[in-house]
Image (spheres, rainbow, N blue to C red):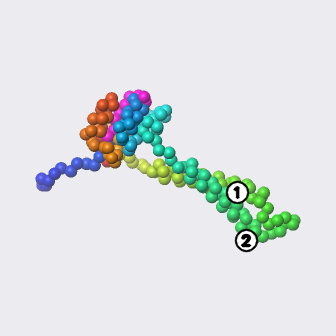
Amino acid sequence: MSHGALSVPPVFGAMAEFDTPEELVAAGERAYEVGYRRMDAYAPMPVTGLAEAIGYRRNYVANCVLVGGITGACFGFGLLEWITCVAYPHNVGGRPLNSWPAYIPITFECMILFSALTALISMLAMNGLPKPYHPVFNVPEFEHASVDKFFLCIEATDPNFRQAETLQFLRDLGAREVSVVPA
């Protein structure tokens, strides 16, 4: 039997439970004001102003979709240009080989296809999905996040996170329940 020091399980963060969306937004704003940056909020419905309160960072899915669409249009146009002018040139009725008006439907469809695939892949990548498990599921009260409760979780990776101080800070915000989120 070992008499060494007890190992403390790693901690993902600290979670506070609130009853109303207004309390959650106020808590998020206050946490952001005091310097917490690595936090997330969970609510059973969309809450106006919540993303801004916790310091929402703009994502780049739209820019990726634009690049994907331009790439798809260039690919579709280039493919048709290559097919009709280089690989299989056929002079039909004295028309020029690169009759670009005929390329428009295929160019448009390739643009839509590449944009849609880029949107799907970039959204999944930037959201870190698929993620079938998350440490917040270890908190028993979190099952109410999809029904009637509102949660704010400050992650342990935040530079300002000190477990005792963060738990007390969340209590001071008027949280109904404060929990440590095991990793």
Which residue is at 27% across, 35% downward? Answer: 168
Q: Is residue 152 visible?
A: no
Q: Which residues are magenta?
A: 14-22
| Drawn side of residue 57 relative to residue 182, left or right | right
Residue 63 position in % (x across, y down): 57, 51
Callout 1, which amino acid?
A: Thr
Residue 125 position in % (x across, y down): 48, 53
Q: Residues within 10 Å of mark 1 (few under 14, many from 20)?
A: many
- Marked residue nearer the N-terminal end (2 or 1): 2
Which residue is at 76% across, 68% downward? Answer: 85
Residue 18 position in % (x across, y down): 37, 31
Which residue is at 44% across, 40% downward? Answer: 55
| Residue 16 placement: quadrant | top left
| Drawn side of residue 141 relative to residue 121, left or right | left
Q: Secondary structure at mark 1?
A: helix
Q: Which residue is mark 1?
A: 107
15 part of magenta stretch: yes
Q: Is residue 37 above or below residue 144?
A: below
Q: Secondary structure at mark 2?
A: helix
5 part of magenta stretch: no
In front: 81, or 138? 81
Q: Which residue is mark 2?
A: 87
| Drawn side of residue 47 relative to residue 17, left or right | right
Residue 180 position in % (x across, y down): 29, 40
Q: Residues within 10 Å of mark 2 (few under 14, many from 20)?
A: few
